[in-house]
Image (spheres, rainbow, N blue to C red):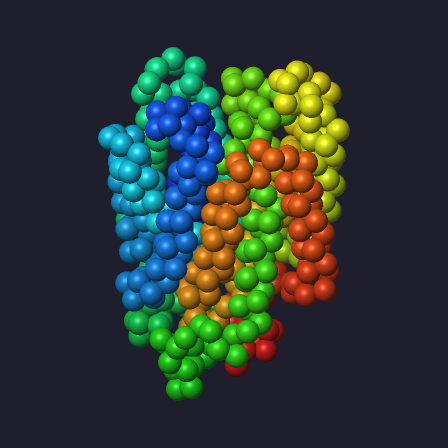
Amino acid sequence: MRYNYLIKSALIAALGGLLFGFDTAVISGTTTALEEVYGLSKFSLGLTVAVALIGTIIGALVAAKPADVYGRKNMLFIISAVYFVSAIGSAFAWDWYSFVIFRLIGGLGVGAASVVSPLYIAEISPAHMRGRLVAFTQFNIVLGLLLAFASNYYISSLDLGAVEWRWMFGVEAVPAALFFVLLFLTPYSPRWLVRQNRTQEAQATLGKLGLDDQEAMDQIEDIKQSIDTQHHDLQEPLFQRAYTKPIMLAFAIAMFNQLSGINALMYYAPTIFKMAGSGEESALLQTVGVGVINLFFTMMAMTVIDRFGRRTLMLVCSFGYIISLSVVAWAFFTYGDDFAGGRPSEGGIIVLISLGVFIASHAFGQGAVIWVFLSEIFPNRVRAKGQAFGSFVHWFMAAAISWTFPIIAEISGGYTFAFYAVMMVVQLFWVIKIMPETKGVSLENIQKKLGIT
């Protein structure tokens, strides 16, 4: 098959997303144990959960320069090693401070992976397949989330006692090691090779990725023109008037992604279900159900993102967000006394179904689109910096949401989800009025479409 090597390389690079998802969600099954072991207040628990997200902010910020200098592939090697160290360190943490440090290290890997994995896949992919292939990253993020939820549930069923939470973190070392080994089978990004004046290697790589000789030569010429070293410095800053439009687009999509409350659900899913009246084991099992829904609708999005486009998926998800979050808010306002008393009620079922619709909406829209869109809208000469900026905004907002959720939700679950619903109304207007469509357009032509010379 013409694109076998391309697909294999994209799948391997997307394993950075699987570890991203696993590392993000694994802590959801350990929050109760961490509160007890380390005697955490709600504020301290929020900090403990959010510290990995602080790491992602740093990782996203620092990933761009080494990805440009040393290459996307070499950065993926480093990221796999960081995940491994974090998994082992978190499992064997000897006190709260060491645990926080190792979680921070894991966050560095997640932040860097959110920049480098989609960036690498976008740069090796032809325009007509780019959406699906970059969405492999999101598919693996979601698969990682599901594996974390399922792993937590399985480990909790083994009755391992005081070390149970340590096993939940430690198992991540296995996929991290596998990721490191498989990376030896992938090529360097041809666009990065052109930036390094390694044109012959770039042409050979494009041939392996499915282009014939003429297509490879044409592609290399387009890349050279988009870089345009006669008029632009390859080290030029991202923040200048010429790049205002992609910067604002990246800021908006990344901000709205987290203002939906998605990471509050990912990090605190069992807590939210317990808030709605579920027992401990039932809440963990319902969390696995969230992961299954997420995976299924991500797969659906991957099949249509290059056919219907990024903007259409965002429109669909915006309506799904607004309806589901509004119903969850209403349920907390209406059945809050029952939830607080731990009494089962129809409100708990309403919350469970509505959060299922919410996660389906996210998976079909924002979840599938964000990493594709961020990897497309910046020119070759600043793409790594632009991807890093979008990831930084995403993770900064994720940290803010995750840190504040336990405090705000303790005051009122209803107002919390109502706020998220209002933010999704604003997102809907942004999609309708501002967001451009990028499906089927080469990276170099997207640059022209956005008016960047």
Q: Can residue 252 be seen in this view?
A: yes
Residue 410: image quadrant is top right
Front one among 376 and 386: 386
Instruction: List x then y, in percent, for residue 290.
Output: 58, 31
281 on left or right of 193: right
Q: Is residue 10 above or below residue 123?
A: above
Q: Where is residue 195 in the image (x, y as percent from the top left)?
A: 35, 72
Q: Tell whether 292 sits left or right of 105.
A: right
Q: Which residue is drawn at 29% across and 66% down?
A: 69
Residue 390, given in percent of the width and then of the height, sits at 49, 60
- Residue placed at 46% from the left, 38% from the top? 43
- Residue 2 visible in the snapshot: no
Residue 65: x and y in percent read 33, 65
Task: Residue at 53%, 45% (x, y): give it.
Answer: 401
**Is 77 situated above or below 127?**
above
Total marks drawn?
A: 0
Please name the residue shown 36% across and 75% down the image: 235
Q: Residue furthest top?
A: 159
